[in-house]
Image: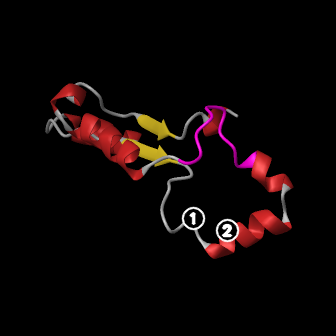
């Protein structure tokens, strides 16, 4: 991403990445995941985020992307933006 941010800067193209974690989608909220947590309850604590939220909503990821792609983010490039309720710093 940083390579592309540097390379495409001369063409006024901004490059950023968004890194979500635990988004409330069928990929996370499904029967297999429920069974996994039931079998291995110790993983439940590991999967928790420092900010007390049940799961991140898809709209939160969308809003981060709209910011980066929109006028408000016009001076942002070369950024890795975690949208993970603090999971990466845990």
Is there a contact, CB below 8 Å, between mark 2 and mark 1? yes
Classify residue 1 by image quadrant: top left
Q: Which residue is mark 1?
A: 29
Q: Which residues are magenta?
A: 46-55
Task: Residue under label 2, please give it.
Answer: 33
Q: Residue furthest bottom?
A: 32
Task: Write the residue at 84% across / 68% down.
Answer: 39
Picture coordinates of residue 59, whole percent (x, y): 35, 47
Instruction: Name the one closer to the observer, 80 or 51.
Output: 51
Count residues near mark 1 (Cα–Cα under 10 Å), then give few for <14, some for 14-19, many for 20+: few
Q: As displayed, is residue 19 above or below residue 71?
A: below
Q: Secondary structure at mark 2?
A: helix
**On the image, which quarter does residue 31 sit in?**
bottom right
Numbered disc total = 2
Q: Residue at x 57, y 63 (%)?
A: 28
Is 74 left or right of 24, judged from the image as shown?
Answer: left
Judging depth in this view, the residue of 40 and 67 nearest the camera is 40
Q: Is residue 83 above or below residue 22?
A: above
Q: Main secondary structure of the magenta part?
A: loop
Q: On the picture, is 79 further left or further right than 37?
A: left
Mark pair 2, 1: CA separation: 7 Å
Q: Is residue 47 magenta?
A: yes
């Amino acid at each position: 991403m940083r390579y592309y941010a540097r390379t495409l800067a001369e063409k006024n193209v901004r490059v950023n990445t968004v890194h979500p974690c635990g988004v409330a989608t069928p990929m996370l909220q499904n029967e297999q995941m429920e069974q996994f947590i039931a079998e291995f309850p110790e993983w439940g604590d590991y999967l928790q985020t420092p900010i007390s939220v049940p799961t991140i909503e898809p709209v939160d990821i969308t809003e981060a992307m709209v910011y980066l792609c929109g006028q408000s983010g016009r001076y942002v490039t070369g950024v890795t933006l975690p949208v993970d309720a603090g999971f990466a710093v845990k």
